[in-house]
Image (cartoon, rainbow, N blue to C red):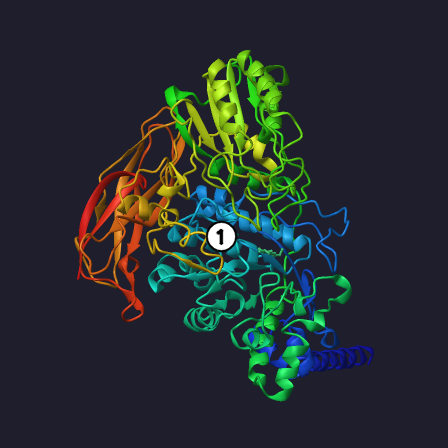
């Protein structure tokens, strides 16, 4: 009897549970497909609730649906670390003490690794930090193309080549999103300068748009399956990019079938009807009605807030428009905050430091190394003079929205001291930048001549000089909101280098920057290293590479021109860059970066794809599996690579393609494949890469589609865009 009672009780309980489960609204039921949950949630929402999803509720968050228990969306910059907490209503920091993050190398460095595995590791690690900090969207990565070395934000992007940026952006996104955090690829599109970024109207050909400026975004959407994308501040063909019909409705949402949410750049919306109809989903950072003071400013005034609701109520905008936006935002929430089994993330841990250091070490580029200046192993020199402000300056702070509050940052000087020992290292500042990040170009209060004098004294008494200079994150250097004013090194560094050279020629120039700079001293110095902004582990990574603990393998993700006018955009004068303040014309068209240098036969100072190693590599002749291909086939390219030196090392091999005879201009060569190959000293490997014939196409403006013109194509294996090893011709039918 007792058994029967228990059984009946259990049955009743099970029945109740089933009932309770079936009562659970579909949108809360994790076992249901996301699309069903989205539709269910949408069907329960009022018009007001749908509109609320489309705009900010604070500086870095947007509404959920409180009545239905659907959470808010929390966002954070991006792209090199998770930014400190910001106040609800202003840009000021919120004063938290638990938000000091790990700083990862800037994306120029990541691109310089030429290693998609590094990109994935980076994405996973930064995604974990974003998740731990309870962010739903990480505002990055950035993939605007490096068009001019003057762009203050190049350091946040992945270089000048659309293929490199496309390959590198995808694993970053996947790594971030596996944490249940959305990546937000930015800035879509053509935000290639900071000067007049809020309104400059970019005029360019369809070919340049599709071949150069869009591919990385396309890869982010189609291959990376990115969940959100940020519009850019500038205009394209007379329309702001945050509500640009061509970019958002036609290309992104129709052609590429993007199913995520389009977020404005902060304050990038200008008009309710356009924002409603031209593809924007979430409006952030607006100062509507021309108001900018907190007292007068209300989130309800946003273009996609009450004014949007009014248009919907009047029937001037169909309800289907807000439904589409709400669907996208809900989908984003279900993919992030409401996803089951979302991991919890991790924050500032040894693994993250190790990832930051590894990316930094792989991204550092050795540009010049006469008579094997480097490596400088521990014990080789007794007296090492370290000169230059960047040896001690924080480079994780500043630069605009990517600024970071870090748990720690190892400076180059710290790195040298721990590597070589305190007793062997002497530091002298040498030059000084403005006293604060925001002091624009105001000179430092420190006396330049006495700084030089002291540095020269230090250099005179040293066995070797490590000059650590470059740019920094001050306004008008590598920073958001302004472009550089000069191509040369700032703060009198050229003069300082000359003065040092007079007393000590055993000097290495270690450049910290996200941009190319002119190098009037290039022939006079035996060694040059490009080290980017490397984040928390920067000093350790630099010391590891320079001492030989790590063999450098980074390659330049953009060309270094000898002089600014050699760069494509600059060779057309002001109308091509920065424009006449209203319009700008991309006259160089598709010939951006090395495409320009190669096609016009202008020698750069250092070419795209270039970088030295402590070992040497011998390339075998390039071969293909066949000689004739159809348009839907893949060319299997292979060649041998031998490490002919005495140390283990890695080489980023590159394969470029060209079509010598075509009905349109084609660049002298274009990157179509690359691979980072790790080889032990003396080891040989056969390198195999695929090139799809369809990727040899150009964008045909006549019929607005990609066209592969039949005929001969030449494939080349190369160590850089300027160092071709061998070539092979194929026929495409
Ligand atoms: C930047 C974005 C950034 C946003 C939020 C804007 O000024 O252009 O890249 O994500 O601010 O900080």
Vertical comparison of 216 with 407: above or below: below
Query: Is the residue marked by circle 1 packed among few (<14), some (14-19), or many (20+) residues within 10 Å?
Result: many
Report the quarter where the C terminus lies.
Answer: bottom left
- Is any atom of residue 225 visible in this view? yes
Between residue 703 and residue 26, name the one nearer to us: 703
Rendered residue at 74%/60% (across/down):
89
Q: Is residue 305 found left or right of 372 in the rendered image?
A: right
| Residue 423 on image: x %, y % | 63, 15
Q: Which residue is mark 1?
A: 193
Residue located 67% across and 30% down the image: 445
Residue 532 is situated, as x and y percent measured from the top left of the image, at: 51, 38
Tell me how many marks there are.
1
Most foreground residue, 91 or 402: 91
Quadrant occupied by the N terminus:
bottom right
Question: Is 653 above or below relative to 519?
Answer: below
Q: Position of residue 448 (x, y in %)?
A: 60, 25
């Amino acid at each position: 009897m007792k058994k029967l009672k228990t059984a009946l009780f259990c049955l009743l309980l099970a029945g109740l549970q089933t009932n309770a489960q079936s009562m659970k609204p579909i949108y809360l039921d994790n076992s249901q497909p996301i699309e069903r949950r989205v539709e269910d949630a949408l069907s329960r929402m009022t018009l007001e609730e749908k509109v609320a999803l489309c705009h900010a509720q604070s500086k870095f968050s947007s509404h959920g649906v409180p009545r239905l228990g659907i959470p808010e969306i929390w966002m954070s910059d991006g792209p090199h670390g998770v930014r400190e907490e910001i106040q609800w209503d202003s840009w000021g920091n919120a004063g938290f003490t638990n938000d000091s993050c790990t700083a990862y190398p800037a994306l120029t460095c990541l691109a310089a690794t030429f290693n998609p595995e590094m990109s994935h590791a980076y994405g996973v690690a930064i995604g974990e930090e974003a998740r731990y900090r309870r962010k739903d969207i990480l505002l990055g990565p950035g993939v605007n193309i490096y068009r001019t070395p003057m762009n203050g934000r190049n350091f946040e992007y992945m270089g000048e080549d659309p293929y490199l940026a496309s390959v590198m952006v995808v694993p970053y996104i996947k790594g971030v999103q596996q944490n249940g955090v959305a990546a937000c690829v930015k800035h879509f599109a053509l935000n290639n300068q900071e000067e007049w970024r809020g309104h400059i109207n970019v005029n360019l050909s369809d070919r340049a748009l599709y071949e150069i400026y869009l591919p990385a975004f396309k890869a982010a959407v189609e291959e990376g399956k990115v969940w959100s994308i940020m519009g850019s501040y500038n205009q394209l063909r007379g329309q702001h990019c945050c509500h640009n019909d061509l970019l958002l409705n036609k290309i992104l949402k129709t052609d590429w079938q993007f199913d995520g949410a389009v977020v404005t750049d902060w304050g990038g919306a200008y008009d309710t009807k356009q924002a409603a109809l031209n593809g924007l989903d979430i409006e952030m950072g607006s100062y509507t009605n021309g108001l900018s003071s907190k007292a007068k400013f209300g989130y309800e005034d946003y273009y996609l807030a009450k004014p949007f609701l009014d248009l919907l109520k009047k029937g001037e905008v169909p309800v289907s428009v807000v439904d589409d936006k709400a669907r996208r935002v809900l989908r984003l929430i279900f993919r992030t905050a409401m996803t089951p089994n979302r991991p919890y993330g991790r924050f500032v841990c040894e693994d993250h430091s190790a990832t930051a250091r590894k990316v930094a070490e792989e991204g550092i580029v050795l540009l010049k190394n006469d008579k094997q200046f480097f490596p400088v192993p521990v014990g080789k020199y007794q007296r090492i003079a370290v000169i230059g402000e960047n040896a001690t300056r924080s480079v994780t702070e500043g630069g605009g929205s990517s600024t970071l509050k870090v748990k720690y940052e190892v400076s180059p000087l710290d790195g040298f001291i721990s590597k070589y020992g305190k007793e062997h290292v002497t530091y002298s500042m040498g030059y000084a930048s403005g006293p604060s990040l925001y002091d624009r170009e105001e000179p430092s209060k420190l006396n330049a001549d006495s700084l030089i004098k002291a540095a020269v004294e230090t250099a005179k008494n040293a066995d070797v000089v490590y000059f650590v200079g470059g740019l920094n994150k001050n306004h008008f250097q590598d920073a958001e909101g302004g472009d550089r004013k000069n191509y040369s090194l700032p703060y009198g560094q050229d003069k300082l280098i000359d003065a040092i050279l007079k007393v000590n020629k055993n000097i290495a120039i270690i450049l910290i920057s996200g941009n190319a700079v002119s190098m009037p001293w290039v022939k006079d110095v035996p060694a040059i290293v490009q080290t980017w902004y490397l984040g928390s582990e920067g000093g350790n990574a630099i010391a590891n590479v320079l001492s030989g603990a790590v063999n450098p393998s980074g390659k330049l993700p953009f060309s270094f021109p000898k002089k600014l006018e050699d760069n494509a955009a600059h060779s057309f004068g002001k109308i091509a860059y920065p424009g006449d303040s209203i319009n700008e014309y991309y006259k160089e068209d598709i010939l951006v970066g090395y495409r320009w240098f190669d096609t016009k036969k202008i020698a750069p100072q250092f070419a795209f794809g270039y970088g030295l190693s402590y070992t040497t590599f011998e390339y075998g002749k390039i071969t293909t599996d066949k000689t004739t291909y159809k348009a839907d086939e893949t060319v299997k390219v292979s060649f041998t690579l031998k490490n002919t030196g005495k140390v283990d090392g890695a080489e980023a091999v590159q394969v470029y393609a060209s079509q010598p005879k075509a009905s349109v201009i084609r660049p002298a060569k274009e990157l179509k494949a690359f691979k980072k190959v790790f080889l032990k000293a003396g080891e040989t490997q056969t390198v195999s890469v695929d090139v799809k014939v369809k990727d040899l196409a150009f964008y045909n403006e006549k019929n607005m589609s990609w066209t592969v013109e039949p005929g001969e194509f030449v494939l080349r294996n190369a160590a850089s865009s300027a160092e071709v090893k061998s070539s092979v011709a194929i026929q495409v039918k």
